Each structure stands twice: as structure tokens, then as C-alpha cells.
């Protein structure tokens, strides 16, 4: 079963990438990112319409969706080993600013559009990932 | 804490399980020692201590020292007001860092080292001096004895509410609003009741003087400075209205701060049916209330005067919590504050020449932080337990001393193990 669930969004993303780029140079990289499917919707018509296929990423990926003051998945502590590459993708339903404390990484959030920050977690400690406007905690990144 | 979403940024890693276990074991062991193996007659005295060298006494009491300290307080306050009013918004401004880190957390360490320092720095005492010069300076009324420390307890609750709950706590306008109200109350109060109002009603002076009772240096009633052990300093804190309330606010708000670091609590606040600010406010008040009720129940067994008589033994426990929660914050964020003061108005200035400096969050080894944090909680517990024991044997007849202090002892073990668990789990 899992293999089928994985295939649907991958196919959708691949098709989108193909149609967006007008060429066929992306599909194989899209198919090699199983992490991207972890929180992806299960039906093609609900798939994000403007997400380009992402290249392979050799680190930890976190995906958060904000609806009003609801954060999905609910805030938790996410542990990564020191030195890991971290990619955080956030989609909010209102304009805001994404901020990773301590590392001081920010990204502008446009309503409905995923925004991404990427960095190497090379400082140990706990760091809140939050939005600056609505003061929402998305999760706490624990680096040790 | 983040003393806010905004200030701080880096939080400590949880303490390892071994440190939790060793700490809890030590706390329980010390409690049994206090109960069974120790003295049966009170031995701590507020008038104990060795006199300090004459030059130190002269230095501490000299006009120059006093004036310099007051000037530091006044100028530091003025600079912070200017930065808060005209600097950049949010945590790019040095003002919130100065208030929450240098002043509020720094006050714990400075008081612990030197005693009630805020009395000497408090800029509002200078304002009061100015007003007294103009008006003749006679207080209009005596400070009502029944009021005691209650105004300070309310003030502390109001400040910790702003520090831990208020959504815009790092904004300059919020700081200026809070401190304007506080200053107005203090100026009116001290004009009516004289300087005694600062001693009893100023939340920061009371906070500093309570913590300062554990300082290695203290002042006798006749004005002589002495070196003394923290137990002898603590025992000098006599029961007064509002005393227990101040300590419950200190303990409850710090516990709330530890508790709210858990993503579980944040999830409750963000997803809950109540507005987040209301939910956080209720959470903080609830913890203060839990501390108050449990303390009251566990000390009343030592007699109706028990809660007040034993209150000084809560100071070390509160101080242990404070160090555990704010040691690394103070270490790292005071550096951030210093860097921001180099460019207080966001004009790309570099007045202090440290603009390129970046805080190195790896300076303190993880194991050292774990030992300091757990060690502070356990040390606070040990000081608290022995202070309580000493007061209990003074208060109660020998055969009741043991049973009378048992509930408080168990409560302290609960506070300490709970505090360690917060350091481990959140």
C-alpha cells in the first residue's frame, strides 16, 4: 500500500513539473524525494498547484501548514543531530514571516504559497520555529 | 524561555536522565538528613556574621559610591527609555533585552552576590529625592502596616505577566506603558508614605532584597556590614502581610515559564477554544495559585503562624529555579544586548565597536549547563530544607517539631523533583 500512496503525489508533482517547465528534465529527481510525499495529499486534484518538484535533499525536512491559528502537525519537539541539514517548508493561509530563532533564519510567507528556509543545524540547543506576525509556535527544533 | 518569543532565541537542551536521577536522590537524601540527623535547637541568627574590614564598610557607605551607583541607575534607565521610544521595533531594539535580561535576570545574580542592590540603583529613589527637595520631604502618612508586601506581590505578578504572557512584550511602547504606570504608582506612593514605600511596595526592591538575603555580605540593623552564611541572612526575614504572596508569585511564575516551554502547552494555547492571551494568563495564575495553596496547606500544620514564619525557606528554592531557567539566557543574551547597544537606533552605527561580533552559542558545554541547572535546583532545595528545619525547631516544642515540618519537607521534595522533571522533560 505505501508504495501506491507514494506514487500518486509523485506522479502529480512530476506532471506539474513537466507542464511548468515545458520540458522533461525534472521527473527523475522528483521521484527520488520520498520525504516530499510524507505530508502530501493523497489525491492528485488536492495537490499543491504551484509547487515545483524539489531536488533530492540529504537532510531532515519539516513541513508545516498553518490555517488561522491552527498549526498542522501540532507543535512538538523535533530532534536532529548536530550538523544535519534542515529544510523547513511552511504554507500559511495569511501573509506572515517565518522565523527560526537562534539561527535567525527568516522567510516571507505569502498566503497559500509554500516558503522554505534551509540551513545546517550546527549549533546545539533548542530553537523555536515560529511566525512573527501571529506569534505561532510551529515546532521546536532540538539540535544535539 | 524565551523571555518571550523574540528575546533569547536559544533554549537549553533538556538535562540528561542521569542528572535528573542524581539530583532527585540528593534532594531526598538531604531532606532526610534535615529531618533526623541534625540539630534540635535553632542555630541560625539574624545577628550572626563576621564584620567586614573597615575599608570595605567605608567604601560601601561612602557618598561617592552611593552617587555613582545612583547615576548608573538613572543613566541606564534614561538610555533604555530613549532606545525604547526611538529605536527599531521588536527584538532589534536593545531596550527589551536590557529590561528582561540585564535588569530582570541580572538582578537575581547581582542580589545574590551583593545583597539588595536595587535599593542603591533604583532611579525612582532619585526622582523621590528631587520631589522631596522641592516639597520639604515630609511623608503625608505612615505606610499602613496591614499593607505589608502586598503591593510588591501585585507588582511582581504584573511584571511577570508582561514578561511571560503579554503578546507585545518586546515592543518599546509596551515597555514604556508598563513602566510609566509602575513609576507613577511608585512616585505617588513614596510622596505620600516616604521611602518606606520603596522598601515594602516596590516589586523590584522587594525581589532584590529577598534574594539578597542569601548574599555572602549583609547588613545588621545597626548598619554594620558582615560576612555571613545564607542561612543567617534568610532567618532575618520576618513574617509580614504579603510575604508569602511575593514568594508564591516568584515560584509560580518561574514554574510557568518552564512549563510553557513544552510544545504540548503551546499546542493547547494555540488550538484551544480561548484566546491565547487569556489561556496563558489563566495558566500562569493557576500555577501561582497552586504554589500558594499547597504551601499554605503544608505549613499550617506548624501552627497558624507557620506560613509566614517558614516563608524565608522558599527563597532558596525560588533562586534555584531562577538560576536553572535563566543562567544560560543571561550568559548569551547579555552579549546580544551589548551588541545591540552598539547600534541602538538601527542607523548602522557602531558606538561600542562590537557590531561585527556574533554570540557564540557553543561557549558553555552542554554537560556544564546540565550540572549548573540541576545543581542550582538541588542546592536551593538543600538551603530551603535546612532553613525550614531550623525555624521549625525554634517554633515548635521538640516532640512536635518533627511532625510539624514534615508536610513542608514533602512539599519541597515535590517542588524540587517537579522542577528537575521540568528541566528534563521540556
Image (cartoon, rainbow, N blue to C red):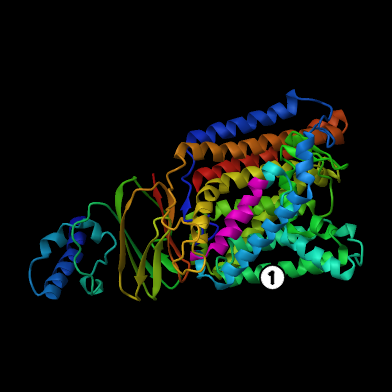
Q: Is residue B234 visible?
A: no
Q: Determine the image quadrant of residue A10.
A: bottom left
Q: Where residue B342 sits in the image (x, y, percent)?
A: 50, 60
Q: Name which residue lies at 59% across and 66% down.
A: B166
Q: Where residue B278 sits in the image (x, y, percent)?
A: 60, 68
How many marks can you see? 1
Q: Mark 1 points at which residue?
A: B180
Give the farthest residue toward the top: B37
Height in image: A89 above or below B30?
below
Height in image: B167 above or below B414?
below
Residue density around tag 1, few if under 14, some if 14–19, many if 20 or more, within 10 Å: few
Q: Name which residue lies at 71% across and 40% down.
A: B215
Q: What element carries label 1?
A: helix
Chain letter belonging to callout 1: B
Height in image: A141 above or below B370?
below
Horizontal side, residue B187 vs residue B82: left or right: right
Most prominent secondary structure in the magenta stretch? helix
Whether the magenta-drawn stretch holds residue B59 is answered as: no
What range is drawn magenta here?
A: B92-110
Q: Where residue B209 sits in the image (x, y, percent)?
A: 75, 49
State the residue in front, B407 or A21: A21
Q: Where residue B139 sits in the image (x, y, percent)?
A: 90, 64
Amino acid at each position: 500500500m505505501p508504495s501506491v500512496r507514494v506514487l500518486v503525489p509523485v506522479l502529480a508533482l512530476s506532471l506539474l513539473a513537466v507542464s511548468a517547465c515545458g520540458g522533461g528534465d525534472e521527473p527523475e529527481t522528483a521521484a527520488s524525494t520520498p520525504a516530499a510525499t510524507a505530508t502530501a495529499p493523497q489525491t492528485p486534484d488536492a495537490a499543491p498547484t504551484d509547487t515545483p518538484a524539489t531536488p533530492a535533499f540529504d537532510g531532515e525536512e519539516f513541513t508545516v501548514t498553518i490555517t488561522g491559528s491552527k498549526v498542522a502537525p501540532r507543535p512538538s519537539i523535533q530532534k536532529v543531530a548536530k550538523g544535519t541539514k534542515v529544510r523547513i517548508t511552511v504554507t500559511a493561509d495569511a501573509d506572515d514571516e517565518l522565523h527560526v530563532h537562534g539561527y535567525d533564519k527568516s522567510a516571507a510567507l505569502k498566503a497559500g504559497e509554500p516558503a522554505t528556509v534551509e540551513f545546517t543545524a550546527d549549533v546545539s540547543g533548542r530553537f523555536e520555529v515560529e511566525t512573527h506576525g501571529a506569534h505561532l509556535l510551529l515546532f521546536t527544533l532540538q539540535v544535539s | 524561555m524565551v523571555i518571550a518569543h523574540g528575546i533569547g532565541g536559544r533554549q537549553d537542551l533538556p538535562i540528561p536522565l542521569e542528572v535528573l536521577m542524581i539530583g532527585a536522590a540528593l534532594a531526598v537524601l538531604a531532606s532526610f538528613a534535615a529531618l533526623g540527623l541534625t540539630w534540635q535547637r535553632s542555630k541560625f541568627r539574624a545577628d550572626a556574621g563576621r564584620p567586614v574590614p573597615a575599608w570595605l564598610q567605608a567604601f560601601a557607605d561612602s557618598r561617592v559610591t552611593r552617587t555613582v551607583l545612583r547615576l548608573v541607575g538613572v543613566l541606564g534607565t534614561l538610555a533604555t527609555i530613549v532606545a525604547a521610544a526611538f529605536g527599531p521595533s521588536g527584538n532589534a531594539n536593545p531596550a527589551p533585552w536590557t529590561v528582561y535580561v540585564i535588569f530582570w535576570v541580572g538582578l537575581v545574580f547581582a542580589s545574590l552576590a551583593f545583597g539588595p542592590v536595587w535599593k542603591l540603583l533604583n532611579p525612582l529613589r532619585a526622582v523621590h529625592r528631587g520631589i522631596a527637595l522641592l516639597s520639604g520631604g515630609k511623608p503625608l502618612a505612615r505606610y499602613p502596616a496591614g499593607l505589608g508586601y502586598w503591593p510588591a506581590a501585585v507588582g511582581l505578578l504584573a511584571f511577570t505577566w508582561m514578561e511571560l504572557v503579554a503578546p507585545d512584550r518586546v515592543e518599546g511602547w509596551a515597555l514604556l506603558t508598563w513602566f510609566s504606570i509602575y513609576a507613577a504608582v511608585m512616585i505617588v506612593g513614596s510622596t505620600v508614605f516616604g521611602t518606606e514605600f520603596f522598601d515594602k511596595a516596590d516589586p523590584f526592591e522587594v525581589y532584590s532584597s529577598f534574594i539578597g538575603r542569601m548574599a555572602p555580605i549583609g547588613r545588621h540593623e545597626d548598619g554594620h556590614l558582615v560576612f555571613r552564611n545564607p542561612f543567617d541572612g534568610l532567618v532575618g526575614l520576618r513574617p509580614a502581610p504579603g510575604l508569602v504572596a511575593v514568594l508564591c508569585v516568584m515560584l509560580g511564575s518561574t514554574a510557568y515559564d518552564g512549563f510553557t516551554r513544552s510544545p504540548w502547552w503551546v499546542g493547547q494555547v494555540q488550538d484551544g477554544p480561548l484566546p491565547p492571551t487569556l489561556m496563558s494568563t489563566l495558566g500562569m495564575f493557576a500555577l501561582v495559585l497552586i504554589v500558594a495553596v499547597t504551601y499554605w496547606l503544608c505549613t499550617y500544620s506548624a501552627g497558624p503562624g507557620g506560613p509566614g514564619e517558614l516563608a524565608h525557606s522558599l527563597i532558596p528554592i525560588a533562586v534555584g529555579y531562577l538560576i536553572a531557567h535563566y543562567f544560560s539566557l543571561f550568559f548569551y543574551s547579555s552579549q546580544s544586548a551589548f551588541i545591540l547597544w552598539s547600534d541602538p537606533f538601527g542607523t548602522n552605527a557602531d558606538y561600542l565597536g562590537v557590531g561585527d561580533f556574533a554570540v557564540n552559542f557553543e561557549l558553555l558545554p552542554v554537560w556544564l549547563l546540565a550540572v549548573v541547572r540541576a545543581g542550582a535546583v538541588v542546592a536551593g532545595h538543600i538551603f530551603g530544607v535546612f532553613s525550614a528545619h531550623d525555624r521549625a525547631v525554634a517554633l515548635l516544642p521538640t516532640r512536635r517539631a518533627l511532625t510539624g515540618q514534615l508536610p513542608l519537607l514533602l512539599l519541597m521534595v515535590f517542588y524540587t523533583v517537579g522542577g528537575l522533571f521540568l528541566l528534563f522533560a521540556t
